[in-house]
């Protein structure tokens, strides 16, 4: 890894250099009932709109490469001939400016599932390979527990990662593209003092976490508590609305619908992101539903994140961003659910 340092004010120059591409970053979208700012990722046209001091966005950045609804292919029929058209939807390069470590780690996890297996997803891969990522340091919000999930620091999955230290940025450079872009700015080599300041910024961040999840032996405890009443307690609160999966940066479950128009001249196959908490998620042809109770659906979401994925990839599928708990109208949060499972609550 190559480290450089530049003046904090130079970040506007970096934005300008990258603005020949479409830039997506955190923007203030409004205010909540306490008059605190609400942020989300959106296309940024002006550097002044980029809110790099954001706490957490409502949605993750996943929808730019895993859209909620995506046309997989279209068929056109004419007489005895037919044509199939496939559009991977990677129209232009995206720069993601200001992703926090948890969201970069979420992307790395999605890559393992959607690009690293025997059947890579070309729709995801086309968009994913067409992006440039500028990571940015963060200050933990009260609901962040990324440090518990090992996602508070990004080691890979970005081109450039910027840590604000006093009035300068410490830049971690991980791609030749990032290196060449920085050649157009005023930078200097990182010194020993900068390394010390970087460590100080890391320990300050660690000291600010207010929320945590004890993950020690969690997969074993989940195996022991599969029949626990805890699942009925939390399932009883769950509204089966699917909001948690909607905002989660690592939820990728989907369904596929086939649509044919009335005169049989066109047909299409459409992919729709789905949530395992929705009532009909496990319903199959003939109408049987393998998980008719909200408690079993909620339980399986937790087992996928904290048990099944760990078994397959030796890491959790949850990055501890806290979005699902913030968005849940029933007040269901990962730290509380895991604590009650660990506590053997009945
Ligand atoms: S846990 Fe909360 S957000 Fe998720 S489906 Fe249930 S009520 Fe909706
Ligand atoms: S399960 Fe919740 S806390 Fe974990 S990554 Fe998804 S939204 Fe974030």
Image (cartoon, rainbow, N blue to C red):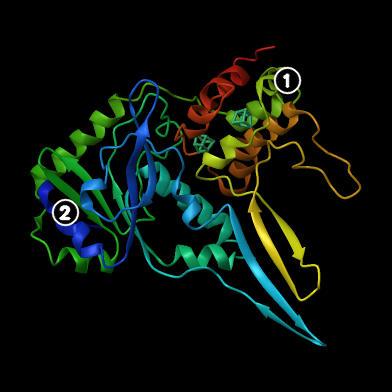
The C terminus: image quadrant: top right
CA gap, disc 2 to disc 1?
Answer: 51 Å
Q: Quadrant of residue 292?
A: top right
Q: How many labels does the image show?
A: 2
Q: In which quarter of the image is residue 195?
A: top left
Query: At 56% across and 66% down in the image, what residue appears?
Result: 123
**The residue at label 1 has a CB less than 8 Å from ligand 1:** no
**Is residue 250 toward the left or the right of residue 73 in the image?**
left
Circle 1 residues within 10 Å: few <14, some 14–19, many ≥20: some
The N terminus: image quadrant: bottom left
Percent position of residue 297, x then y = 72, 33
Query: At 44% across and 37% down in the image, what residue appears?
Result: 58
Tell me the SS state at disc 2. Answer: helix
Q: Which mark is residue 131?
A: none
**Is residue 58 toward the left or the right of residue 224 in the image?**
left
Q: Quadrant of residue 333?
A: top right
Percent position of residue 246, x then y = 56, 41
Q: Which mark is residue 232?
A: 1
Closer to the camera: disc 2 or disc 1?
2
Percent position of residue 217, x then y = 57, 29
Q: Looking at this view, name the residue that lies furthest to the top.
A: 346
Query: At 58% across and 29% down in the image, what residue appears?
Result: 218
Closer to us: 49 or 331: 49
Circle 2 residues within 10 Å: few <14, some 14–19, many ≥20: some
Query: At 58% across and 52% down in the image, what residue appears?
Result: 68
Tell me the SS state at disc 1. Answer: helix
Q: Can residue 317 be seen in this view?
A: no
Q: Which mark is residue 12?
A: 2
Percent position of residue 31, x then y = 36, 30
Closer to us: 222 or 18: 18
């Amino acid at each position: 890894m190559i480290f450089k340092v530049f003046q904090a004010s130079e970040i506007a120059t970096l934005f300008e250099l990258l603005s020949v591409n479409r830039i997506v970053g955190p923007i203030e979208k409004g205010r909540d009932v306490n008059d605190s700012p609400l942020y989300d990722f959106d296309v940024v046209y002006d550097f002044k709109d980029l809110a790099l001091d954001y706490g957490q966005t409502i949605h993750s950045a996943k929808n730019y490469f895993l859209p909620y609804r995506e046309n997989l292919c279209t068929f056109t029929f004419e007489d005895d001939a037919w044509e199939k058209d496939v559009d991977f939807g990677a129209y232009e390069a995206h720069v993601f400016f200001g992703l926090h470590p948890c969201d970069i780690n979420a992307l790395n996890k999605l890559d393992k599932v959607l690009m690293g297996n025997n059947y890579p997803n070309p729709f995801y891969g086309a968009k994913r390979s067409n992006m440039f990522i500028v990571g940015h340091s963060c200050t933990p919000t009260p609901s962040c527990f990324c440090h518990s999930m090992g996602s508070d620091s990004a080691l890979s999955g970005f081109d450039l990662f910027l840590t604000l230290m006093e009035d300068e940025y410490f830049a971690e450079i991980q791609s030749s593209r990032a290196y060449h872009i920085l050649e157009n700015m005023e930078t200097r080599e990182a010194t020993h003092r900068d390394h010390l300041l970087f460590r100080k910024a890391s320990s300050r961040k660690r000291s600010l976490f207010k929320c945590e999840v004890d993950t020690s032996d969690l997969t074993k405890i989940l195996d022991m508590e599969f029949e626990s009443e805890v699942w009925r307690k939390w399932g009883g609160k769950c509204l089966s609305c699917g909001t948690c999966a909607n905002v989660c940066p690592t939820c990728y479950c989907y369904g596929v619908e086939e649509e044919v128009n009335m005169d049989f001249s066109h047909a299409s196959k459409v992919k729709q992101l789905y949530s395992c908490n929705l009532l009909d998620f496990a319903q199959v042809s003939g109408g049987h539903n393998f998980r008719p109770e909200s408690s079993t659906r909620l339980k399986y979401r937790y087992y996928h994140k904290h048990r099944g994925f760990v078994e397959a990839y030796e890491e959790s599928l949850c990055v501890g961003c806290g979005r699902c708990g913030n968005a849940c109208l029933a007040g269901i949060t990962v730290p509380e659910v895991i604590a009650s499972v660990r506590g053997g609550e009945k």
